[in-house]
Image (tube, grey):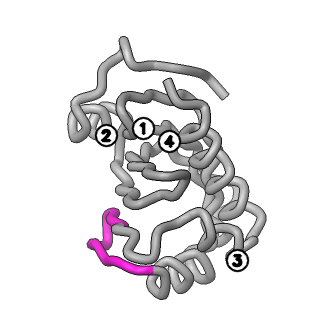
Amino acid sequence: MSTSEIATVLAWHDALNSGDIDTLLSLSSDDIEMGGPKGATQGLTPLREWASTANITLIPKRMYYYDGVIVVEQQATWATAPEETSIVASAFRVVHDQVISTFRHETLDAALKATDLTEKDRVSDT
């Protein structure tokens, strides 16, 4: 297990949740790939735009790791409906302490299936 890769993903969440866009970008590769329910995109400019306008908070919960791939179950809250939360999951790929991809899934099971991770890859409950 690489604590460096997990630390990168946790720092990425911290930066997103605190609105620290500069740190979020520094933790992401120049050609980061991102995807979710509204489609996919690539690069730091779309990441900056998303992080600045999504008004989302993602609190990490269970984490799974294998060979640079991290799946994080997340408690999601949007500023437009702060009393409502959803449980989602995101799959991250980290190389050289930078997130090179992140894809959000509607469920933990979907994220695990997309990455071929299983319960045996579980590393923590944060």
Q: Give the structural element (helix, strand or loop) at label 2.
A: helix
Which callout, 2 or 3, points at the residue further toward the start of the chain? 3
Q: Which mark is residue 111?
A: 2
Instruction: Give the camera-side residue of 27 and 38.
Output: 27
Q: Which mark is residue 87?
A: 4
Q: Amino acid at mark 3?
A: Asp
Q: Does the residue at mark 1 contact the one at mark 2 (Cβ under 8 Å)?
A: yes
Q: Which residues are magenta?
A: 34-43
How far apart are the two marked residues, 4 and 3, measured between alpha carbons? Answer: 26 Å
Seen at 70% across and 69% down, the residue is: 23
Q: Nearer the viewer, residue 95 or 39?
A: 95
- On the image, which quarter does residue 111 sit in? top left
Mark 2: amino acid: Ala
Residue 71, image x, y percentages:
42, 38
Q: Nearer the viewer, mark 4 or mark 1?
A: 1
* Residue labelled with disc 3: 22
Q: Residue furthest front?
A: 96
94 to the left or right of 60: left
Vertical arrangement, residue 41 with respect to residue 6, above or below: below
Residue 74 sits above or below residue 15 on the image? above
**75 relative to 46 in the view: left or right:** right
CA–CA distance in space, label 1 to label 2: 7 Å
Q: Residues within 10 Å of mark 1 (few under 14, many from 20)?
A: many
Type of amino acid under label 1? Val
Q: Quick one: which residue is furthest to the top in this view?
A: 120
Q: Residues within 10 Å of mark 4 (few under 14, many from 20)?
A: some
What mark, if any, has residue 25 been given in the picture? none
Magenta region's main secondary structure?
strand
Q: Residue at x 47, y 68 (%)?
A: 29
Residue identified by numbered label 1 = 71
